[in-house]
Every structure is written in structure tokens, then in C-alpha cells.
Image (tube, rainbow, N blue to C red):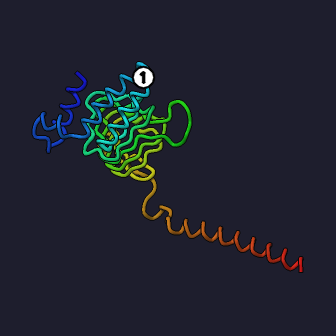
Amino acid sequence: MVIWDDIKAVKERDPAARNILEVIILYNGFHAVFWHRVAHLFWRIHLKFIARLISQLTKFFTGIEIHPAAKIGRGLFIDHGTGVVIGETAEVGDNCTLYQGVTLGGTGKDKGKRHPTLGNNVMVGCGAKVLGPFKIGNNVKIAANAVVLEEIPDDCTAVGVPARIARVGGKKVERDMDQVHMPDPVSLEMCKLLVKIDKLEKRIKELEGTDNADL
């Protein structure tokens, strides 16, 4: 039974969960997933207003927003959960874990598939954002506060903004860029400012020339 898998996921992955009764009564992450499954059933039989009503009430009581059209696999564990958002065309595989503040969102108002698809056994750290209609592979780990904007293959760990692959199969990824050859972000911003200042000075001179001509 899917609901039983959800309960077991919380009990097995949260060391603070002392017993199953506590999970059922007190865990807002479990409540959000349970009521999403109810809302999803109404969505599938085209009772979409009821589905949205359930999802909005669930959001109010749990602080977790899951669109009723989203497809959620077995054993999803939303830990703490406040601020989690899962978009309409998002898909989540089996045995995934999402921490507080996670967003599975889109990048605009495009139609059709616009949210990510998570494989099985994916862990998304607190505050991470996965934005766009691409696939996150099986057994992927996404670090806290990472911003993922492109596909990640199986068995990888992604970190940073925008996210890059830091580990593959548990082994650290070696990169050509080192601390000597890495561009200085401060210098890059200074260059951008200098270009803007130069454009503004030219514009000021053009306006001054126009005013002098009028005189």
C-alpha cells in the first residue's frame, strides 16, 4: 500500500520518529503527501476544483504546496517540510527525500512539461531549487541551497549556484579550472561597472552637445 510506504519512509529515515503513531499524527510532511494523494485522485477524475481546494487547505495547515497534478512515487519523505513547493508537471520517483524549502519549479509561464522529473532515491537538500523540465537521475544527491538548471545523470552529487556535478559514484570530480586560473568574480563585476560608466559618460556628452547646440 502506497500510504504505508510513506509512513515507513518517515520512520526509517528520521531518527527523531519514535513510532508509527507519532508519524501519522504529528508529521506535517506525511500529512502533505497523504492529502496530495487524495487530491491527485480527484484531479485524475477531472474534479479539479475539489483537488485544488484540498491542496490549498493542505498548504495552509502544513506549509507545503504540492500541485494536485504532480506525480509522486512511493515512499516520499518530506523532512520538516515548511516552504516545500512541487509544481504541476513535476514527477518524483520512489524513495525520495526532500528537506525544507525545496522547490521543484519551472522557469517561466511555458505550457506543457515545465517542471523537473526526479528519479528514484533522490535526496534534495534544504533550500535547493530544481528549475526546469529536465530529469534528475536515480541516486542523485543535491546539496543544500543548490540551484539546478540542467539534467543530472545517475549516481551524482550536485552542489553550488548554478549547480555543478561534484561527485560521480562517490568519487570527486577533477576539474581543469584551479584557484590560479579561475576568474575573479570581483574583477568581472568591476569590468561590467566600468563598461556601464563609459556608456553613461558618452550619453552625458551627447546630451550636453545637444543642449549647447540649442543655445
Quadrant location of the N terminus? top left
Residue 83, x across and y down, in percent: 34, 47
Type of amino acid at the residue the image marks with label 1: Leu
> Hey, which quadrant is residue 188 in on the image?
bottom right
For the point 40% across and 34% down, the residue is: 67
Q: Quadrant of residue 209?
A: bottom right
Q: Is residue 205 visible?
A: yes
When asked about the image quadrant of residue 63, the answer is top left
Q: Position of residue 116 (x, y in %)?
A: 44, 36
Q: Nearer the viewer, residue 95 or 40?
A: 40
Label 1 sits on residue = 47
Name the residue rendered at 39%, 50% in the picture: 146
How many callouts does the rendering have? 1
Q: Position of residue 140 (x, y in %)?
A: 33, 39
Is 156 drawn above or below residue 144 in the view shown? above
Number of residues whose C-alpha sits closer than 10 Å to that of mark 1, classed few (under 14), some (14–19) or many (20 or more) = few
The reply, left or right, for residue 158 in relation to residue 9 is right
Q: In which quadrant will I find the C terminus? A: bottom right
User: What residue sits 41% from the left and 18% below the top?
Assistant: 45
Q: Is residue 168 visible?
A: no
Left or right, 165 with reference to 109: left
Q: Determine whether the residue tagged by mark 1 lies in a helix, strand or loop.
A: loop
Q: Residue at x 60, y 66 (%)?
A: 192
Front one among 139 and 101: 101
In the image, taking residue 208 as reference, residue 113 lies left or right, namely: left
Q: Nearer the viewer, residue 107 or 169?
A: 107
Using the image, determine if residue 112 lies above or below residue 182.
above
x and y percentages locating residue 81 in the rendered image: 29, 44
Outermost residue to the left: 18
